[in-house]
Amino acid sequence: MNALEQKANAGTSEVRADMEVDERAMRQWMEANVQGFKGPMTVLQFRGGQSIPTYQITTPGASYVLRRKPSGQILKGAHSVEREAHVQQALGKVGFSVPHIHGLCLDEAVLGTPFYVMERVEGRIFWDARFPDVAEHDRPAYFDAMNSTIASLHRIDPKSVGLESYGRSGNYFARQISRWSRQYLEDEAAGRDPNMDVLVRWLPDHIPAGDETTIVHGDFRCDNMIFHPVEPKVVAVLDWELSTLGHPLADFANHAMMYQMPPDIVAGLAGVDLDRLNIPSQERYVADYCERTGRASIPSWEFYIAFNFFRMAAIFHGIKGRVIRGTAASIHAQERARSFPVLAELARRAMEDCR
């Protein structure tokens, strides 16, 4: 993501014409369900490319964030704001860094789709994984904060926070590979890619031994976190749409994949001089996570990277299909579609490094 795209994603703007909110109904619901709410209120829309429409609600005394399910036809289970609210409420009870959830509304008569309201957490969001706005000597501390946060998430026992039924346990990789392979193969409009065809055949037969189940975020990146205004501290993890119960090494590798991710696709560090920028190496970053989670090492590391590039490529392939069919809603859909073959090639390279 280049500098112009980062700027376009930051902040708020007027609500898009196709995503307007009934402000009268919203105010009435807030008055009845959010403790301490008092209008008048203004509603703006966050510019970021969320698949779930996200708004800022501001009053003279407070600021809130509204996330609501998109309108129209969507895939079963997709964009589940109910799940997002549920996991954040559960994690907040044990002190994990998530925004406080003020309320969840399942009554579609209010805004047309379910929604929830959470606190607006003040702080900084970094769209660039190089953390260019942070002093060079401070950058290791910011990476350490991300590392510590994802490790602490994976140490939480799902049962202890009432999330034992938040997803299926066991065989995470087999189920995920099957799901994304099927989606790739069935989307004929988007076409086939030789790298993806190889991965579809190779991945199921090379899943590493051992099985674990923890709470996983699914999209743990620097731009999905809010950092303290001045300190190297994660104060809130956002965008829980892809969270579930899954394998922690899939989740951590998806995060650490930033070291091999081109920065023009999502926040990545590929091609960056880490020493010059004083950013910890991938080896150091993995070792720190291992120390925090009680692991000696992570065998088959490149498999986990290959799997995650494959998963992201399959997601982007689906976006490509929607662009071709004219049903893609995101303003970034076309650039995502163009990035699909790059991700497929990166997945193939990681697969070859496993041999």
Image: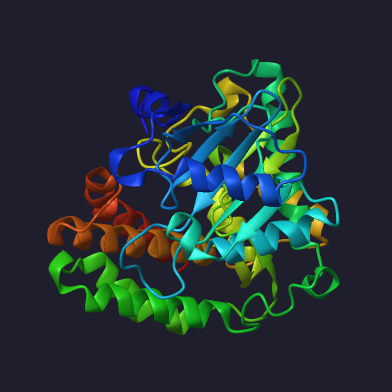
Q: Please name the residue shown 38% across and 35% down the image.
A: 15
Q: How many marks?
A: 0
The answer to which of 273 and 228 lies nearer the viewer is: 228
Q: Residue at x 41, y 75 (%)?
A: 76
Q: Position of residue 308 (x, y in %)?
A: 47, 61
- In the rendering, at what x and y percent does residue 31 appear? 67, 44
Quadrant of the frame with the N terminus? top left
Task: State the residue in front, 8 or 260.
Answer: 8
Residue 301 visible, this orientation = no
Image height of 274 relative to 79, above or below: above
**Image x and y of residue 169, in percent:** 65, 82
Q: How is the image coloured?
A: rainbow
- Asked whether residue 312 is in view, the answer is yes
Q: Taking 324 as reference, is 201 above or below it?
A: below
**Horizontal relation, residue 148 to residue 21: left or right:** right
Quadrant housing residue 132: top right
Q: Residue at x 70, y 52 (%)?
A: 33
Q: Residue at x 44, y 45 (%)?
A: 22
Give the percent coordinates (x, y) of residue 29: 60, 50
Q: Quadrant of the C terminus?
A: bottom left
- Vertical placement of 94 versus 248: above or below? above
